[in-house]
Amino acid sequence: MNSYLQKYRLRVKRRYLLARALRRRRQLVQVTGEPTRAANDILGFVCVRNELERLPYFLNHHRAMGVDQFYIVDNGSDDGTAEYATKQPDVTLFSTTQSYRDARFGMDWLNGLLMRYGAGHWCLTLDADEALVIPHQGARDLHDLTAWLDERGALSLQTIMVELYAKGPISHVSYTPGQRFEEALPYYDAAGYRRETHPVYGNTSIRGGPRERVFFQERPDLSPHLQKTPLIKWHWRYAYASSTHIALPTRLNSQSMQSKMPTGALLHAKFLPDALAKTRAAAIRKEHFTNPTDYDAYYGALANDPDLWHEDAKTYAGWEALESEGLMGRGDWR
């Protein structure tokens, strides 16, 4: 396709997504007041449904990394998630019972909040089952990283989603809310990832990991995309096009993939014991995929309580190990 025409179509799509976000933002009811934002505050954004098990650690982990305020959309939780969030002084909570799928899997709501609150701030947009890992984790935080990126005119950080799992059936995992994800789910796949250039957006698409290995061997084209751009210096004209896998304009998806730029990882804690009940509910609600019938076999296999471990599994040992395995890197941020 002609490159000018491609850029034009993507510009039109971005405007369409922004218009959707403005409309869908009206579906949100603000539940708690908003703390005063400072100019250099790093903001976190997340859409949740029944995440009381993960939310305490999610918030504590990212607070420790330097997120100053969180904007949470609760989509009809009935497990106490909303009640927990209202008690957090750094959380601004919004509520909606509208369709998650019709809101582009929550991204219309989050794009609307990013437009309203995120402009001019570094914004971290995640799922509640994700924990960000950056180079120098523990010794430096997101304020250190974003200051370094600002000095170089970089606008984003790319990451790979590293899916964590335990040894044995999912139902045998023991997890206490607030516990580190990797303590209950200590293993991950260090190899077996495929990288290719997306034909439309030009970003590097990454697939592989335990879900492809266990559930999508026969249909690797349906396995989840693992690349994400969760950390962006936000502008009101920006928009996420496909979860946080793809952001527009497209330059946001490639800045940190340059060899001199650092990259991070998202530790993905999907496979805690509640994944079984969540899977059964998702199969009934059909709110999580554009073509949900394509994933009936996946839902069935996951609901059967599989063991995701294999003999080449690695035990999570920190960001340095992920860097040595080529899953993330510090680039020139030394």
Image (cartoon, grey):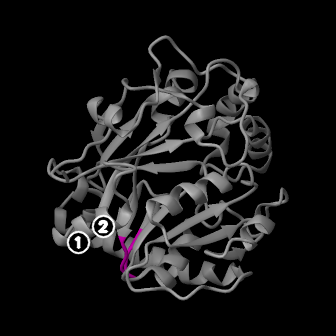
Determine the residue positioned at 26% across, 69% down.
Answer: 147
Determine the residue positioned at 62% across, 37% down.
Answer: 294
Asked whether residue 234 is drawn in magenta, I would say: yes
Image coordinates for residue 191, horizontal then vertical, percent? 36, 24
Asked whether residue 123 is drawn in magenta, I would say: no
Quick one: SS at disc 2? helix
Callout 1–callout 2 Cβ contact below 8 Å: yes
Image coordinates for residue 222, horizontal then vertical, percent? 51, 36
- The boundaries of the magenta stretch are 233-239
Seen in the image, is 140 located left or right of residue 217?
left
Q: Name the residue under label 1.
A: 150
Seen in the image, is 299 located left or right of residue 322?
right
Image coordinates for residue 68, horizontal then vertical, percent? 50, 72
In this view of the protein, can residue 106 be seen by the observer? no
Note whether 155 is above or below 200 in the view shown.
below
Determine the residue positioned at 31% across, 48% down.
Answer: 136
Note whether 267 is above or below 151 in the view shown.
above
Q: Looking at numbered disc 1 in the image, what kind of residue is underneath it?
A: Asp
Mark 2 packing: few (<14 Cα in 10 Å), some, or many (20+)?
A: many
Res. 146 mark = 2
Q: Looking at numbered disc 2 in the image, what kind of residue is underneath it?
A: Thr
Determine the residue positioned at 73% across, 65% down.
Answer: 75
Residue positioned most to the front = 139
